Image: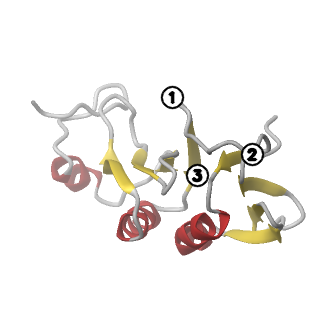
Amino acid sequence: MIGYAMFGTDDVSKSSVFYDKFLTLLNIIKVEIGNDYIGYANKASPQETIFYLTKPYNQEKASFGNGTMLAFKAKSNQVVDECHSIALRNGAINEGSPGLRAGYGNVYYSYFRDLDKNKIEKTIEFCKFSNLRALEEKNGFSEATNGRFFRKE
């Protein structure tokens, strides 16, 4: 079981402002504020911090991990879209626009890098789209095979 996730940052205040813009859409709230860190929790469980932004303990410059990514679950594809848009408007780098991904079934993803280049994913798993055929075509996918979709060439 994972207790919490932590991202290093050289500017806790600036990172907190960035994350505050979209974490509320995911029902994640700020619950701890220290000199060198900020802690966030699920609104339903504010006593259980799940995500920290912190200056590195060793006092060296913060850096992102190659192959490291933090995924937040969203309640709908609209929330994924909105979080992605808010993040990009506030300085994030697009690493994958919202939509379905080839070979991953009814999973709607979006990816971006935060102000410190940490990779973030927003996902809504096992979505029940009211008009899946239209969504497939909008995102350039062909017919499903065994519950999976494949991008048209």
Q: Position of residue 81 (x, y in %)?
A: 38, 63
State which tag comes first along the sequence, 3 or 2.
Answer: 2
Q: Secondary structure at mark 2?
A: loop
Q: How is the image coloured?
A: secondary structure
Quadrant in the picture for the C terminus: top left
One can see residue 124 in this view: no
Q: Write down the quadrant of residue 33 in the picture.
A: bottom right
Mark 3, Cα crowd under 10 Å, few <14 / some 14-19 / many 20+, is: some
* Mark pair 3, 2: CA separation: 28 Å
Q: In the figure, is residue 47 to the left or right of 142? A: right
- What residue appears at the point 36 percent right and 70 percent down from the top-left corner? 89
Quadrant in the picture for the N terminus: top right
* Residue type at the position of mark 2: Gln
Seen in the picture, residue 58 relative to 139 is either above or below; the reply is above
Q: Secondary structure at mark 1?
A: loop
Q: Which mark is residue 59?
A: 2
Mark 2, Cα crowd under 10 Å, few <14 / some 14-19 / many 20+, is: few
Q: Which mark is residue 72?
A: 3
Q: Which mark is residue 67?
A: 1
State which tag comes first along the sequence, 1 or 3.
Answer: 1
Q: Position of residue 135 (x, y in %)?
A: 25, 54
- What residue appears at the point 59 percent right and 64 percent down from the top-left corner? 15
State which tag comes first along the sequence, 1 or 2.
Answer: 2
Seen in the picture, residue 12 relative to 153 is either above or below; the reply is below
